[in-house]
Amino acid sequence: MARHGKVSVIGSGFYGTTTAQRLAAYDIFDTVVLTDILEGKPEGVALDINQSRSIEGYETKVIGATTTPEGAGYEAIADSDIVIITAGLPRKPGMSRMDLLEVNAGIVGGVAKNIAKHAPNAVILVV
């Protein structure tokens, strides 16, 4: 099966990590990029996924990149065909749904600006 293109996953929590791993295992993309603001986490997850390539039998390369809210690190998603946003905070005890919406809207808004700058032609999926 021919692989082509690049897909980026923003957020390396449970959903982002699982999404990146499954996309790599499907072996339809050349590259999967996983990003997060937690320093070192996306790089570590990418390393784990890449180490399973020979066992699982896929060749898709996974790249991890730490990003900042100011936009550093987002160059890793440049020229992505698809960007999947899984970033966000979970609801905490006592937090209303409106409070959660306000926090996560700010996160997604900042991510969207960086996608527009580095991957303006990408199809964007929000989880």
Image (cartoon, rainbow, N blue to C red):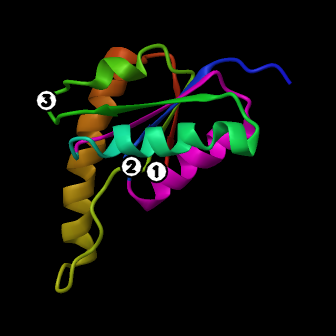
Q: What residue occupies the far bottom of the structure in this picture?
A: 94
**Residue labelled with disc 2:** 12
Nearest-to-viewer mark from 2 and 3: 2
Report the amino acid beneath label 2: Ser
Q: Is 41 placed above or below 124 here?
A: below
Q: Secondary structure at mark 1?
A: helix
**Residue labelled with disc 3:** 70
- Residue interval drawn in magenta: 13-37
Q: Is residue 27 left or right of residue 124?
A: right
- Tell me, yes or no, whether the two marked residues, 1 and 3, touch with CB atoms within 8 Å: no
Nearest-to-viewer mark from 1 and 3: 1
* Quarter of the N terminus within the rendering: top right
Q: Earlier in the sequence, mark 2 or mark 3?
A: 2
Q: Is residue 99 at all visible to an observer of this figure? A: yes
Structural distance between the alpha carbons of marks 1 and 3: 21 Å
Which residue is more in the foreground, 112 or 80?
80
- Locate residue 46, reporting x and y percent: 46, 39
